[in-house]
Image: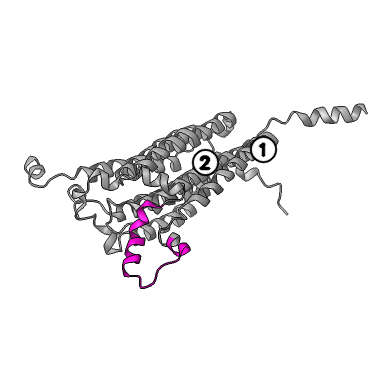
Amino acid sequence: MNLLTDPIGVSHYLAVGAVLFVTGAVCMATKRNALGVLMGIELVLNGANINFVAFGSKLLRSDSFGLDGQLFALFVIVLAAAEAAVALAIALNFYNNHTTIDVDRADDLKG
Amino acid sequence: MMSLLAATAINWHSIFFLLFALVACFFALAVLFTSNIVRMAFYLILSLGATAGLFFLAGAAFVGAMQLMIYVGGTLVLLVFGVMLTAQQSFISMKTKGGDWILAAAAGGTMLVLLISIAFRVEDWRAGRPDGDQLTAADVEDTTRIGAAFIGVRTDKLDVYDDAAKDGESEPDAAGQLTLQGMSGYLLPFEIVSIHLLVVLIGAAYLARAKKRAPARSASTTQR
């Protein structure tokens, strides 16, 4: 199909969501900075949000989920904000106690 | 080139989708591949802003606006503050080991191929809505309905009840009516999330408070 002339479908949104999700997951796995891990989480949540909105969109499908997709996306946004606030507080606490932000140094609980 | 443009009507919706999708994916990858934490924060802002554009293109104007206001305007500002508070010389740029990159690239690439191949495998999802250009702005205007759903009224599910009442043989009871109309809506999750936000706010303030009391208390105990 020609992307310039044909209307886009849910699949294209899902592909963008997949890219954001995988980037965020790899970000979470590889970053050594605790705030980098947080940014990976934000990317993952956004990838999921794109899928919710795409499945709920009336512009992309006639038998969409309707309002539920958008409402779920809104809840995800709010919970992401709450999660970022708590995680940032924990990261700052960790930085104050250990004078480092490297997650590999957080091994106090090693058995 | 001009004849090609004239022959087939350019679908501006698709063009803008491509634009926003490329910006979102490119800067998400930039977040992954840069090791500078300050640049990561900036690229993340651009990526999430482009995602808000995708929401607008999908007809979810309210979610797109909330994405810009809460995510880009709130959560990321919080993250940037965290970066500023911790960006000491040695923590600005932290390199990942080569072996970690190889493992992550193998796992991530496999997952990406899997997800995208699944996304394009379903015939129904691949093509856009054929009568999409006949939709008017009023058809996708959802902001009022979202607000009503949050206070427990699902105005978009009213026809479900009407259809059920038409071919229903018996009179539905009052509780059944409410269920059919979807009148439970999202009032309970909305309340839960509001309490959750309050708890999180208090918890975050408690966790991140300045700890100057500990040395003072030890000083007072030594005085005793």
**B84 left or right of B27 in image:** right
Of A12 and B42, nearer the camera is: A12
Q: Is the magenta stretch mostly helix, strand or loop?
A: helix
Based on the displayed image, in which of its 4 quarters is residue B213 positioned?
top right
Confirm whether circles 1 and 2 share one chain.
Answer: no
Is label 1 in contact with label 2 (beta carbons under 8 Å)? no
Residue B61 location (% of width, % of height): 34, 41
Q: Residue at x 61, y 43 (%)?
A: A103
Q: Residue at x 54, y 38 (%)?
A: B94
Mark 1: amino acid: Leu
Q: Does the magenta stretch include residue B8?
A: no
Residue B208 location (% of width, % of height): 65, 35
Query: Which numbered marker is on residue B207?
Result: 1
Q: Residues within 10 Å of mark 1 (few under 14, many from 20)?
A: some
Q: Residue at x 61, y 39 (%)?
A: A91
Based on the displayed image, in which of its 4 quarters is residue B183 positioned?
bottom left
Looking at the rendered structure, the secondary structure element under dot 1 is helix
Q: Mark 1 lies on which chain?
A: B
Of B175 and B78, nearer the camera is: B175
Of B187 and B194, nearer the camera is: B187
Q: Quadrant of the image for the N terminus of chain B?
A: top left
Is residue B191 in view from this perspective? yes
Mark 2: amino acid: Ala
Residue A86 location (% of width, % of height): 60, 41
> Which contiguous range is marked in magenta?
B154-177
Residue holding disc 2: A81
Q: Estimate the spatial distance between the alpha carbons at disc 1 and disc 2, rounded to whole Å.
A: 16 Å
Looking at the rendered structure, the secondary structure element under dot 2 is helix
| The residue positioned farthest toward the right in the image shown | B224
Q: Mark 2 lies on which chain?
A: A
Q: Residues within 10 Å of mark 2 (few under 14, many from 20)?
A: many
Colour mapping used in the image:
one colour
